[in-house]
Amino acid sequence: MSWISSNLWLIPVLPLLASAVLAVTKQPHRRFAAALAIGSMALACLLSWDAFLTTLHAPAHGGIWRDFHNFRWFQMGDQWLWLGWLLDPLTAVMLVMVSTVGLLIFIYSVGYMEQDANFTRFFCFLALFGSAMLGLVMANSLLLLFICWELVGLTSYLLIGFWYHKPSAAAAATKAFITTRIGDVCFFLGILWLYGQSGTLLFYDHGRGCLEATALTSMVTQTTISGMAISTAIGLLIFCGAVGKSGQVPLHVWLPDAMEGPTPVSALIHAATMVAAGVFLVARVFPLLNASSGGGAEVSGALTVVAWVGSITAVFAACIAVAQTDIKRILAYSTVSQLGYMMLALGVGGYAAGVFHLITHAFFKALLFLGAGSVIHGCHEEQDIRRMGGLRKYMPATFATYAIGMMALAGVPVFFSGFWSKDDILHSAFAWPVSKGPFFLGLIGAFLTAFYMTRQVCYVFYGDYRSAHGNKRQNKMPHESPAVMTTPLKILAAGAILLGLLGTPAWPWFQDFLTGQHATFRFGQLFEGEVLGLMLLSTLMVAGGIGLGWWLYGLKPATKAEAADPLERVQPAVFGLLREKFRVDEIYAATVIKGTFRLGEICSWFERTVCEGCIRVVTYVALGFSWLNRFADEYVVNLGFDTSCRNLRQSAGLLSSLQDGQVQNYLRVIGVAMAILVLLLVWGGGL
Amino acid sequence: MQAAFFIIAALIVIGGLAAMLVRKLVHAVLWLMVTLASLAALFLLLGAQFVGFAQILVYVGAVAILIVFAILLTRNSEWAKAGRLASPSWLVGVGIAGLATGCLIASILASSIPPGVPVPPAASVADIGQKLMTEYVLPLEAVGLLLTAAMIGAVIIAMPEDKRG
Amino acid sequence: MTFMAMITCLPHMLLLANPDEWLVRLKQTIVHWLPGPWQFVISSLITIAVLIAVFGALFAVATLIERKGLGRIQNRPGPNRVGPYGVLQPMADAVKMLIKEDVVPRAADRVVHFLAPLVLVAPVMLAFSVIPYGQGLVPINLDAGVLFFFAVGAASELAVFMAGWSGHNKYSLLGAMRAIAQMISYEIPLVLSTVTVVMMVGSLSLVQIVAAQGGYWWGVIPRWNIFAPWGLAGFVVFMIAAIAESNRSPFDLPEGESEIIAGFLTEYSGFKYAVFFMGEYFGMFAISGLAITLFLGGWHAPLPYLGWVPSFLWFFGKLFIFLFVFIWLRGTLPRLRMDQLMNYAWKCLLPLALINIGVAVIWRFTAGWPGPLRWLVCALLIVLAFVWLEKTWMKSRELKPRTYHYAS
Amino acid sequence: MIPLKAYLVLSALLFGIGLAGALSRRNAIMVLIGIELMLNAANLNFIAFWRFHPGTEPLAGVMFVLFSIAIAAGEAAVGLALIIAIYRHYKTTNLDRMDSLKG
């Protein structure tokens, strides 16, 4: 029982307080706002590291170390609703990741949002997001998690629509909110069902929690429709929430549009932390999903679904990313694809691999987004990669860090964290007993990732600056961003490289930390089983992707912004389909949205004819009554009333002479009354 | 004990009478303070230490100063030199007061209250604090609210009208 | 116990027992000889006599120190004619005051004019009766000592009013009104900063408040209230309010010689003036004594191995330091303007005192935290809240450069 | 030992004095002073009864007086503010000249 684990609540509360103060701060207090938000986040970060170190030094005797504090929130009937917080390795690494990446992005935002009029509001929202996200990862109650879950959804909505005067931003915000809501409804149903089944929403509660053996066995043994175990059904419902939040197919459509928000927001919320919340959720309720009647040997139905959804998303989004031209959209589809990877990892049982990829991805994707932000900033708010080019010369620091991020994402072997985590996932997928499908999909995804990242880097950083050719009049050359923006880039780049060393097959420290084992360094592990073979295979895919990309885009960089893409020349139809994102939005517009509108029209018709008709009848009846009423009032009541009033006024005139305005006369009356009262009491037999 | 009671009682009555009879308002306030301070002494004599101190703190420290300020702010009332001291029908007022007091005293003397226990109930400050925070917490909050309202009300009433906005 | 036994016992009682309590024991010994019914009366009289003697002497010493100290600060010798180095100056002053003519203006209200100095001095002397001067050296151990102190202190406002009003002089009245407004305004932060201590100790008894400050943290830092963040802030508020309450510089507007020719003291001379003077000094001693009791550990020694020094010496030592600070402030700080004075009390001290109470509550509820962290968090809370508040408030009333209409 | 009745008679006398003043003085401030006297007479009653017949609730009398003192202070503040406001308007504190509700 350490100090930090009993005061873990401080971590989300500090940014929450900052946000509350900022909410009532007037706009011009820029430095104050930034200092408060960053200060609170820095404190939260310190505390998070403290929590992490505490977890690190925790006594690991058998199984995962957990420390949780539950408290009662409110009473419903005779039941108390409990909330609580939890400190375990998963929480600890997530806390550290969220607060560290968050802190860096907060600092970066100072530079990026410098010119914005609503600076204070921005930091208020950011701090609120930080608070909710930190609360989410340390929740020991599915309810608290859901509250924070909705709060991050809210801040995501607010921040995507931060520039609400842009119609596209407002539309994107609404889209994000509504799309994720579809998943959240299922999530909430899952929560209710879980509460109904187990009577608690606490994850761990000395054996009584819903993720502990007692509740799980009872849920596994009962079945619902078509023989599905209740735990599987609940798990799938909860997974729906994760699908919405993490932008998995088919609810991925909101995430690329969410890039309308400011770039730090894209980096923080829509790349590193919030979208990973879905993955975190799946990791958190992993015991529930994993529960199957056959014990550990049998693969549960829920996880199979997770694996397939993840692997399809990974390839699907990567395909789309190949044909995009907006720098941030490419990264957004890449995020969707990588989140698919994480889901895939969790689905095939590679719990630790999935979380490891989550952490490394958070770092290098935040790095890429911030780098993209720096590029956009440097190119005067230009987002189309066809109008960039040659930025290597103008923005050396950004280029270097961006290249590191790109190589980490692509999975360039040995030195970059993405390689190790992706390899770990492929390894888990290979070992999955059900099917090899996800494994091959993962390999294709790896190839595509390497390809589109190479394409993007070639477009942005190689060749000549194309915007200057297109527009001579505005001949502004790109420039490097200020230090407040590049410093976080450098720190993140270091993270993107170094983090990989924590989870190599030779020294799987991270994976063992999460699963509560003691890691040992053994170089020989690299050569055991199919480890080396898989590594070689994935290296081959990556090399293929990068090589193809370089061959297509790097050797002969495009010289004009309007020039057609090399792929487009080869296969215009396929490329067009990819550029149109497989027309998912259009399909949705034609089916779901149109259907909703139809339903709305039917409801409206019903309302207008049937309901309104009833109301109108009632109105006429009421009108008739009131007319009667008025008649009676005027001719029956008023006449009599007037007469009595006149009489009353006359008598009141007489009485009013008693009210002469002399206060002391009133007092005297009171005095006499008191004397009489006392007399009555004494001689009336009162005493 | 007895001597103390009689001295204090005499001070109270003399102070009260003088407060009501003197011509100068400021002197009336000073006499009032004599009465109230003696009353505080009587409270101490009766074992109600906390009440006695509170009485001095509130009346001598606050109410007296308030009245004095009010007197000085209504300058021409300070010296009641012109005109009569009492209202024209003062005899009626005194008569009524005498009647009321007579009734009270008569009823007190005629009543059959048991003479009472000599041992005073202990009222340590800690007890009072304990009770104020537990049993009497609602009245305490109400009084706090009332005093706040009274303060704001007094400020607004006494503020010159052109400043009230 | 026979007389002889008493005599033989005496040295033992005085010296060998706890040296701290030999004064108490001496009094007990003296009183013990008396017949029963008189014991209480004589015991009280002895206490009163000692109090008057000690504080009277202290008054004389304080005037001398003040005059010498001010002289030192202003680079002049100060009194140096009466006695060696002028040490007999207080005697000379006393004689001068006593034989001066006692002037009473014709229009004055003679009775009130006469009563005012007495009403000022008597309550202050009452206030002396609840302060613990040393271990066991408290004249009356009242349950509600703090309340008693403030209750009797309240009477001084009435005295000031009486003095100002009775002279029938507009400067007197103006000075009195100023003084009363000032005293009322500063009494609020004074009491609020005391409330934090009362809250934390959980008692209104000054003896218990001192007892609660015994002991040492890590064996070195005494457990005085001033070493807690709320105590430090409370002490600052208390001291500022106390200086204002005793009408000392830089809050000495009510007696401003240059503006309202000494305010409510204008119409006083001779012995009455001396009594007023004494009353103000006594007030200063009393409020310093309260500050020492509340925040500076009363008679506790500052370091553990200094415990053998009789406790009342510590108390008076601290009192002398306070005296010095009072004189030092008078010698260095200029007088405030009336509006500044009021703003300072209501917009600066009062919020600080309120914030301080809030932080004291936080301190109370974070008892389980590691000490330095708890200290830092609470101190930061006070400072940040206060700085933020003042910055927001004071922004609109920044002083503009002064313009002179008739001088270039 | 002083009997309870002595305190009650003293309180009644004080009450009577206050009442007489409140009923017959012309000055509004004097009326207020009279009312203060009456209030204090009531307080004395509370304390006397508390001392002699504590009853089941040992501190009720003291509490009553504490609250009564607090309320009396509030009453004095509001009353005096009213008097000052009226004075500003009528230029008098004589009660017999304040006899209309309209300003």
Image (spheres, helix red, strand yellow):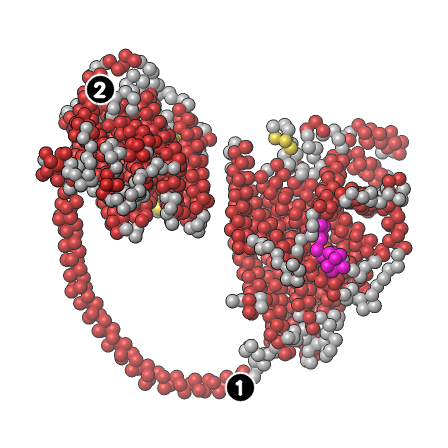
Which chain's residue wears label 1?
A
The stretch in magenta equals: C245-261
From the viewer's perspective, tell me whether residue A20 is left or right of residue C328: left
Q: Quadrant of residue D2?
A: bottom right
Q: Amino acid at mark 1?
A: Leu
Whole-percent x, y for residue A98 in the image: 36, 34
Q: Secondary structure at mark 1?
A: helix
Residue drawn 41% across and 43% down? Answer: A16
Q: Quadrant of residue B73?
A: bottom right
Residue that badge 1 annotates = A654
Total tally of numbered discs in the picture: 2
Whole-percent x, y for residue A615 in the image: 21, 67
How busy is the neighbourhood of tag 2: few (under 14 within 10 Å), some, or many (20 plus)? Answer: many
Q: Real-space Cα distance between discs 1 and 2?
A: 110 Å
Eyeballing the image, is A43 above or below D96? above
Eyeballing the image, is C316 above or below B140? above
